[in-house]
């Protein structure tokens, strides 16, 4: 394919950004310090304001009063879009077993319609949907405006519906929930709310608000309806007051009163991907570019006669491999001629592939003879060449002390040639064994009976690369402590009651739900609580790059803790295209609950056709269509945002041909994922991550096999959009 300039290709990929992210007005907001309300949004005590968080902020709020304990996770997903995931213990609202409280899951969206004009009269305006996909205890909508009156004083006025108007929506106890209640939005009586925030000092903010929330819930089952008071009694007045103190880096603690009688306490924190604890990083400075000597000083080096010496390339390759190893790069192979050198590197240290490429280019100027002018740096992933960046050595020498955009303008990005002539593998590189022994921690969130479940212990991991692309890997775990226990799925019609592990093991009929759905994830707790060693994964994988735009993977073995079998995948992806298409087929069998080598009777074939599209500003959309573990067919939509420093936050939803009744509580599968690079917290360069996926419930509908090293995430770091996002680190 014809080669074109890297910068022109990559800048073209940024065109969709305005459609995805919106464009802030750019007006600076001079306003008092923000207070996070008990629902996890900028606000008063309970009511919202039209202030917004910095783009990309991820925060959490824990608020407790006599009425409820609310645990909120807030994410400023786009400059104008705020999302909140909430898990609340609501007092006085008994569940089916009359425990006197329920654990409720809810989700909010808030859109910033207008930014404040600090030079004129226009306030900030926001529109929000509160608890629009949960069971509806907190269901309500609002429109709110906020104006900064002085640098330390702001006021907000809004109108609310539902809970915000003291008019709770009627909840059908038998409704599975989890679906938007569009017919209720902005319906019913509407009442005003208001708040004032005064920044008394640099750290202390005082808040007063007028709220119409009566803390009531209305339940219905069949023809019966119950009007239930949350907590002990209705607030004595509409006035709430709070004091909030900011400390440290993004932390806030507060005390508040509701109706003048009930006291509550709150703790919040906020993290922003752009504000790392060590923003400059602690990595060592790269080796400087070494300019070539004058031709008269090294005539043999400039003439290229060295290339005829059979000992030259092995010596150069060994020296360059040693230098790259100190930079965290693995030199897998190399092609070397009199005027051109191609190195195939595996980045083992840096979150941004551009930083690995830049450091490699510097070292090539130090190791190669003067006659070598063309430098080709091919990025490899799991033995597959993923992309090639071509540079002129003279440009690297000339532009070392300029901004990264100038070297991008003269670089060329192309698809890697799978099998170039003259490729020499670095001696003694394969087979290659890596292993690690350390602690592990598994967390379980949002269980209605145990809001936080945990298990910790020791884990041994090993990865044995037999040859490039052929990898044997696995891990073994030994539990030490935890409150998780092996437990069967819930008993139908008896909320909070579960089959014992012994009952579930003894009765094969329980592996199918009363609605006729095979249990593929709703018995997940049966795979926890083992006190003997377990083997969560043990696989042999083969990765290949058979043609220029096609990548393949075949993985066999114990694929995850619940399933073993064979998974095969093929991916089409051009290096300069934001679009990728993949197909995956799996034949798997359910593993036994001891976590070792035995299997159960259930066997299934699953598969998906997947489309991926990378927008600018780190947004990626993914659509998977196919067959899931329970035999249901449908589609999953995922939207992920990744920041330049490696933070990755996403949301997904799956809808299949399984009905809401067959699926159970929640109606369809959905959740959020979070992945934070360890380097963000430590300042030390590392590709390791702390990752988690949060679902409100584990259900059988829309359940997909978990397979390590799927192709798209394996190769995308060195392809156009992702590479360009981190190109500013080329000279780091």
Image (cartoon, rainbow, N blue to C red):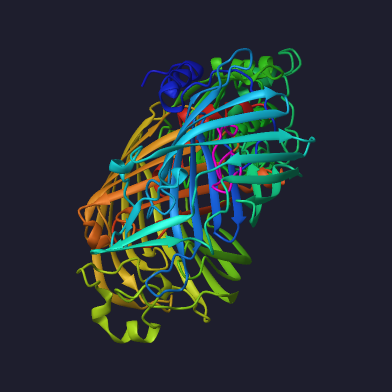
Report if residue 432 is visible in the image: yes
Residue 507 image offset from top left, x and y in percent = 27, 84
Magenta highlight on residue 273: no
Which of these two is toward me, 78 or 109?
109
Quadrant, the N terminus: top left
Residue nearest the observer in this picture, 362 or 527: 527
Highlighted magenta segment, given as a residue range: 37-55
Q: Is residue 493 above or below residue 16?
A: below
Q: Is residue 348 visible?
A: no
Residue visible at 74% across and 34% down?
A: 199
Residue 262 coordinates in the image, percent (x, y)? 62, 57
Q: Residue furthest right?
A: 201
Membership of 45 in magenta stretch: yes
Which quarter of the rendered picture does the C terminus lie within? top right
Relative image position of residue 174 (x, y in whole percent): 28, 63
Give the mark count. 0
| Percent of width and height locating residue 367 | 68, 31
Q: Is residue 453 left or right of residue 629?
A: right
Magenta span: predominant SS is loop
In front here: 728 or 511?
A: 511
Front residue of 453 and 116 = 116
Tell me if residue 81 comes above or below residue 680 in the rendering.
above
Residue at left offset 27%, top offset 56%? 628
């Amino acid at each position: 394919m014809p080669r074109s300039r890297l910068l022109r290709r990559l800048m073209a990929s940024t065109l969709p950004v305005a459609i995805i992210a919106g464009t802030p007005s750019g007006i600076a907001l001079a306003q008092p310090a923000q207070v996070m309300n008990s629902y996890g949004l900028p606000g008063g005590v309970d009511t919202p304001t039209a202030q917004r968080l910095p783009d990309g902020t991820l925060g959490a709020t824990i608020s407790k009063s006599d009425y409820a304990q609310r645990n909120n996770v807030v994410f400023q997903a786009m400059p104008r879009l705020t999302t909140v995931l909430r898990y609340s213990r609501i007092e006085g609202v008994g569940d089916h077993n009359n425990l006197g409280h329920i654990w409720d899951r809810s989700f909010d969206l808030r859109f910033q319609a207008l930014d404040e004009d600090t030079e004129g009269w226009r306030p900030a305006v926001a529109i929000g949907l509160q608890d629009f996909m949960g069971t509806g205890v907190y269901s309500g909508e609002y429109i709110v405006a906020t104006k900064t009156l002085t640098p330390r004083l702001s006021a907000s006025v809004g109108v609310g519906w539902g809970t915000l108007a003291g008019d709770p929506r009627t909840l059908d106890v038998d409704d599975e929930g989890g679906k938007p209640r569009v017919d209720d939005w902005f319906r019913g009586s509407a009442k005003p709310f208001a708040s004032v925030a005064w920044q008394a000092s640099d750290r202390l903010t005082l808040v007063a608000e007028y709220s119409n929330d009566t803390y009531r819930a209305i339940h219905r089952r069949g023809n019966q309806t119950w009007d239930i008071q949350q907590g002990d009694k209705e607030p004595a007045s509409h006035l709430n007051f709070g004091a909030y103190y900011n400390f440290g880096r993004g932390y806030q603690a507060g005390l508040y009163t509701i109706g003048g009688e009930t006291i509550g306490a709150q703790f919040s924190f906020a993290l922003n991907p752009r504000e790392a604890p060590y923003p400059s990083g602690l990595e060592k400075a790269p080796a400087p570019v070494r300019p070539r000597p004058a031709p008269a000083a090294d005539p043999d080096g400039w003439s290229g006669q060295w290339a005829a010496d059979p000992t030259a390339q092995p010596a150069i390759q060994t020296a360059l491999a040693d230098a790259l190893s100190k930079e965290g790069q693995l030199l897998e192979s190399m092609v070397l001629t009199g005027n051109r050198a191609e190195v195939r590197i595996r980045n083992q240290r840096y979150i941004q592939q551009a930083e690995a490429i830049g450091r490699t280019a510097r070292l090539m100027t130090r190791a190669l003879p003067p006659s070598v002018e063309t430098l080709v740096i091919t990025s490899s992933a799991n033995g597959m060449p993923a992309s090639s960046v071509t540079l002129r050595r003279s440009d690297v020498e000339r532009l070392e002390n300029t901004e990264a955009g100038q070297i991008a303008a003269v670089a060329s990005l192309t698809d890697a040639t799978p099998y170039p002539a003259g490729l020499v593998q670095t001696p003694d590189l394969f087979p290659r064994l890596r292993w690690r022994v350390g602690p592990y921690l598994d967390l379980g969130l949002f269980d209605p009976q145990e809001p936080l479940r945990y298990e910790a212990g020791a884990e041994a991991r090993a990865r044995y690369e037999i040859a490039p692309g052929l990898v044997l890997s696995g891990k073994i775990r030994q539990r030490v402590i935890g409150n998780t226990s092996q437990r069967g799925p819930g008993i139908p019609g008896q909320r909070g009651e579960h089959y014992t592990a012994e009952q579930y093991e003894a009765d094969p009929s329980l592996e199918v739900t009363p609605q006729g759905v095979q249990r593929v994830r709703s018995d997940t707790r049966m795979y926890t609580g083992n006190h003997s060693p377990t083997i969560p994964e043990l696989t042999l994988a083969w990765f290949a790059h058979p043609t220029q735009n096609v990548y393949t993977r075949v993985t066999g073995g114990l694929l995850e803790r619940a399933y073993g079998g064979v998974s095969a995948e093929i991916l089409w992806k051009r290096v300069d295209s934001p679009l990728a298409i993949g197909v995956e087929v799996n034949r798997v069998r359910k593993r036994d609950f001891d976590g070792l080598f035995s299997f159960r009777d259930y066997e299934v074939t699953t598969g998906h056709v997947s489309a991926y599209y990378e927008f600018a500003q780190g947004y990626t959309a993914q659509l998977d269509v196919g067959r899931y573990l329970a035999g249901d067919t449908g589609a999953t939509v995922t939207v992920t945002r990744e920041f330049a420093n490696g933070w990755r936050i996403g949301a997904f939803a799956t809808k299949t041909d399984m009905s809401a009744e067959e699926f159970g509580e929640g109606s369809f599968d959905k959740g959020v994922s979070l992945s934070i690079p360890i380097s963000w917290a430590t300042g030390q360069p590392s590709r390791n991550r702390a990752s988690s996926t949060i679902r409100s419930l584990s259900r059988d509908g829309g359940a997909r096999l978990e397979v390590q090293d799927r192709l798209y995430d394996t190769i995308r770091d060195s392809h156009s959009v992702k590479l360009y996002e981190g190109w500013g680190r080329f000279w780091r």
